[in-house]
Image (spheres, rainbow, N blue to C red):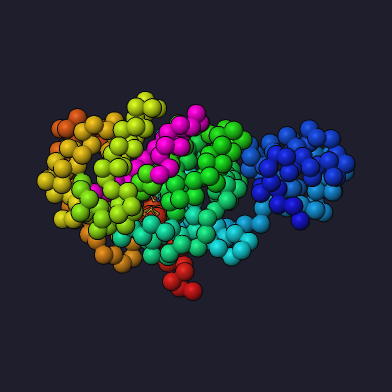
Amino acid sequence: MFVLRNMTHDELERMIIALDEPKYRVNQIEDWLYKKAAGRIEEMKNLPKSLFAKLSECAVVTTSKIHQKLISTDGTLKYLLQFSDGNFVEMVLMRFDNRANLTACISSQIGCKMGCKFCHTAKQGFTRNLSAYEMVEQVLTIMQDTGLKVTNIVFMGQGEPFDNYDEVYKAIEILNTKLEIGIRRITVSTSGVVSRFNDYTSRKLLPTLAVSLHAPNDTIRDAIMPVNHRYPMDALKKAMIKFNEVTGKRITIEYILLERLNSTPQHAQELAEYLKDIKCNINLIPYNSGDKSDFIKPSHKTIQLFKLILEKSGKKVTQRLERGADIMAACGQLTGKYLNKN
Ligand code: SAH
Ligand code: SF4
């Protein structure tokens, strides 16, 4: 059986030739697959009967299934998608007030090797990388299920995108060229795998870069993000400055606020000093605890003070909206819960 969503343009072309059909049918099929997010061959209405019959016999659009779908009171949707090998990934669709923008948060790996202490995905360990097609599949599944066009993508679900770099980049190319999602509307978030920065920085097709910093110094970062032992903050800073210089683009710095650990006024000052030479915006993320947790989310007052100090240093600071808290829409929570039950 051919699985159409897993096939390259060339592979589709070879299949079409083997089925004794003209090559241009491939474009029609790809149009259905990517622009119209068709979930079944029966939906491909403009295909001639002969091709339709042949395809129905030897191909399916996809073999993955929505295992669970949760709808938050704020409109956020969370999906648990099961691949044919039995593994699950999760993805989230966020609708912001401006309905024209629909942001899909997708996963790049099943589990993650990075072991960040505050992250639910880390607790699941690492199972395997996702292929580019499995990443695109997540976006198509959302479009197919909702009938809506996804306009923005963030690689902020499970996994470390820079630890599955080639497939993530291939997915970005497909999302940009075939689904026609603007490159600036795609964001890759990394925990700071510095070895990939050079290559990423040199790409012509360059999505927005977000760096999960979460600490103002190496002592704190070492304690909560093991990746920092391999790529300490000084090396990360150099890589970020080079990114600014070569691309002329800003970086989004993500910073989870954890009570006492990284969110005092002194921490804010130290962070401002570290970020002084980096062109960036800062996105503060109140810690999302899920069911059980080892950390505490700081009070509103602590968060506001932290924000103010950073703003005074001249940075643009935003606070991430807590979307879908009632359906555990933060990184790794749904799969974690499901796997714990089984
Ligand atoms: N591995 C990549 C991308 C996926 S995580 C990375 O770490 O950047 C996406 C974002 O969610 C990261 O900034 C991550 O640190 C954050 N995150 C993880 N666990 C969280 C939690 N419990 N509460 C709030 N944000 C969390
Ligand atoms: Fe992996 Fe990101 Fe979670 Fe760290 S925060 S364990 S890098 S998914």
Dividing the picture into quadrants, the one containing residue 224 is: bottom left
Give the residue drawn at x 44%, y 47%.
162
Please, which residue is most extreme toward the left here?
A: 266
Q: How many numbered circles are shown?
A: 0
Q: Quadrant of the N terminus?
A: bottom right
User: Is residue 326 in view from this perspective?
Assistant: no
Give the residue drawn at x 67%, y 53%.
62
User: Is residue 235 in view from this perspective?
Assistant: yes
Name the spot of residue 302 as percent of width and height, x first.
Answer: 15, 48
The relative height of residue 137 versus residue 239 in the rendered view (above or below) is: below
The relative height of residue 218 versus residue 148 in the rendered view (above or below) is: below
Name the spot of residue 144 as percent of width and height, x first.
Answer: 60, 46
Left or right: residue 17 versus residue 296 is: right
Dividing the picture into quadrants, the one containing residue 253 is: top left
Where are the magenta residues, as a range? 195-215
Residue nearest the viewer, comparing 53 with 215: 215
Left or right: residue 238 versus residue 107 is: left
Give the residue drawn at x 71%, y 52%.
3
